[in-house]
Amino acid sequence: MIYKKARDMRSLINEFLRAEGLETPLNEYRIIQAWPEVVGQAISRYTGQIFIKNSILYVQIRSAALRENLSCNRTALAEKLNRHVKAQVIGEVRFF
């Protein structure tokens, strides 16, 4: 009996997603779903629309004061979200 090199399921799934062009959309979905967990419930309550376009995460914040405060931490937020999904998905966060 000949055994092929065994591979773990995670690497096989990741390889399939990459080959089918599904890895990026899946990671974008994971970033959006991670927003409440990463920023916490207090900020999440003031969040409206969230979407990603051209590697930029756009987040609607319904409080002008909070939007201004978060704008100072855009780079750190992008890094935290990318770390959370273990992939480089977004390069920037913009608030509107």
Image (spheres, rainbow, N blue to C red):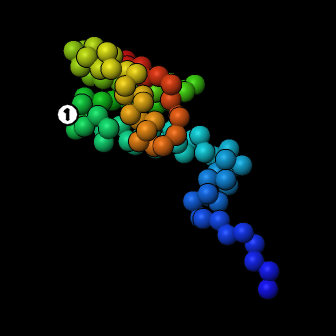
- Toward the viewer: 65 or 9? 9
The image position of residue 90, as x and y in percent, is: 50, 29
**Is the N terminus in the top left, top right, bottom left or bottom right quadrant?**
bottom right
* Residue visible at 25% across and 17% down in the picture: 69
The image position of residue 60, as x and y in percent, is: 35, 24
Q: Would you place residue 58 above or below residue 86 in this image?
A: above
- Toward the viewer: 5 or 57? 5
* Residue visible at 72% across and 49% down in the picture: 19
Q: Would you place residue 10 above or below residue 79 in this image?
A: below
Which residue in the protein does label 1 denote? 42
**Is the C terminus in the top left, top right, bottom left or bottom right quadrant?**
top left
The residue furthest right is: 2
The image position of residue 72, as x and y in percent, is: 31, 15
Secondary structure of the residue carrying numbered label 1: helix
- Toward the viewer: 87 or 58? 87
* Residue visible at 57% across and 25% down in the picture: 54
Q: Would you place residue 57 above or below residue 21 in this image?
A: above
- Toward the viewer: 87 or 31? 87
Q: Quadrant of residue 77?
A: top left
* Residue visible at 30% across and 30% down in the picture: 47
Q: Quadrant of residue 41?
A: top left
Asked if residue 51 can be seen in this view, the reply is yes
The image position of residue 33, as x and y in percent, is: 40, 43
Q: How many marks?
A: 1
19 left or right of 28?
A: right
69 left or right of 90?
A: left
Asked if residue 58 can be seen in this view, the reply is no
User: The disc labelled 1 sits on which kind of residue?
Assistant: Ala
Q: Quadrant of residue 81?
A: top left
- Mark 1 crowd level (few <14, some 14–19, many ≥20, 10 Å Cα): few
